[in-house]
Amino acid sequence: MKTILKKMLDVKKEFPIFKNNPHLVYLDSAATSQKPKTVIESLKNFYEKENANIHRGVYTLSEIATEKFEKVREIIARFINAEKDEIVFTKNTTESLNLLSYSIKDIIPENKNEIVLTEMEHHSNLIPWQQMARRNNMKLKFIPIKNFELDYEKAREIITERTAIVSVTHVSNVLGTVNLIDKIINISKEKSAITIIDAAQSVPHLKIDVKKLDCDFLAFSGHKVYGPLGVGILYGKKELLEKLPPFLTGGGMIEEVNYDNVTWNRAPLKFEAGTQNIGGVIAFGEVIKYLEELGLDNIYEYERELLIYALEKLNEIKNIEIYNPGIDKSLALISFNIKRIHPHDVASILNEYDIAIRAGHHCCMPLMKKLGISGTCRISLSFYNTKKDIDMLIKGIEKVQEVFK
Amino acid sequence: MTLEMYREYILDLYKNPLNKGNIENPSHEYKKNNPLCGDEVKIQLQVEDNKIHEVKFQGIGCAISIAFASLLTEKIKNLTIEEVKNLNKDDILELVKIPLSPVRIKCALLSLDVLRGALENARD
């Protein structure tokens, strides 16, 4: 443990944002993570030395770009234990989920017309399905929450033979709850439903193994995993990706085109219409290498210790309400409210002390209504945070309480 | 300085807001969400002879939005409908001169938005 801690304390130096903002206490990594030097250098290197479009270029630069781009597909596949052709590049989790919500109808049997979500979904794993249900006259159902976690007993009743799709977040971006998705996937399999995992908040913190999970699809965003903005991933089982029709159409995703008809390229390329974020994807590949070097187990251990510390310290604050299922059921983020002080006011005053937290509904308006609140203050942690950051936060909250005394 | 934003005056209005409550049979009523934070503000008006005879607001919000809702409702009492319709952003922000970031300006202006909605929504 000691060695892990020491290794991690040096990590902050590798993130230039902290050099340029030496007092910054960044507690909003669940919104977007900061970027290590290696990512920024990769982007710079690409645009300065290697910029070219991929796939159809016959010249050297284009060939290099293509090779590097496709190499990242392999790196990501290895990272989540998938096959190379099971990785689709999108722009973010939202686009990955939208792709599915528009293309998946074709592989749903006619006798199935229900979509099951949970009450804790981010808008990006709610609205695409709401719209799909509306377009296709399907029914939306929600697995309820109890004590800030899913009610698995109810899940058994809600997922039925009529269930076509079960789309569930792995980790709640509001509660930090780590859902037992293996349980949900198993129940869904029994009813032959397609399983989709929104892994936006879990991939930065947990080792993901899609083969072990046996989910059908899984989506996440590069920018929350220390990568550049504008790179998203959709994992899909190969046989399912082959069956899905494309979502966006245009260049790059075709095999043969005539004026009045077209044949699609193979998966995953048929889902990648238009010029991709090549430099971003290549830089994202560097991140994965960086994280693997750091060790995902080390990251998990370190962040867990930080979370324990943060929960302990926050619990000592007077007039605080914490929305968290407990240390063993959550990771890396804590939502709370200070009695009689609006989250925006808390965040505004903390900002005065260079402490960046998020305040509001966190794109989970229905969950807020369910909890009977309009918003929360949320801190989210990363391995570049330290116990000192938490101490600064606690001092900051004390100042907030002083202002509103 | 953000802390200047929370001067005594604002905090007083937050803790003891003016014109907070309900009108039993308002002539105009409207409510709206601030999509940023999910806060909801409702404004009710009693318009008589083309003038704001009575005004009340309801809702939860941050110190900034509640303080400005207090000040705005106070300002429009006895104004004519036209005068109220002519109120602009700057008229509101001048009610208290505090430094507000672009995001917090939205909190300050939420009640003006709701007020405009109320004027459009006469109840029969």
Image (tube, rainbow, N blue to C red):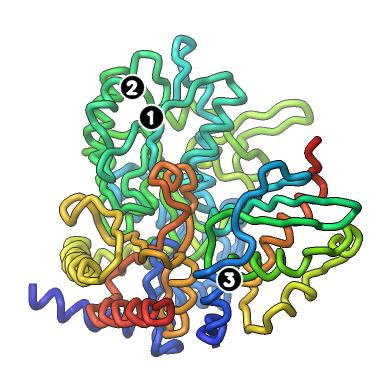
First reached walking from the N terminus: tag 2 or tag 1: 2
Q: Where does residue A193 sit, x and y in percent of width and height?
A: 36, 22
Q: Residues within 10 Å of mark 2 (few under 14, many from 20)?
A: many
Distance Cα–Cα, label 2 vs label 1: 8 Å
x then y, percent, for residue A239: 39, 28
Which of the numbered marks, if any, corresponds to residue A159? 2
Residue pointed to by mark 1 = A166
* Quadrant, the N terminus of chain A: bottom left
Q: Judge the density around disc 1: few (<14), some (14-19), many (≥20) Cα neighbours within 10 Å.
A: many
For residue B64, the mark is 3
Name the amino acid, label 2.
Answer: Ile
Residue A361 x, y percent position in the rendering: 47, 54
Label count reads 3
Element class at badge 1: strand
Rendered location of residue B120, percent (x, y)? 82, 47
Lateral position of residue B15 relative to residue A170, left or right: right
- Residues tagged 2 and 1 counted as in contact (Cβ below 8 A): yes
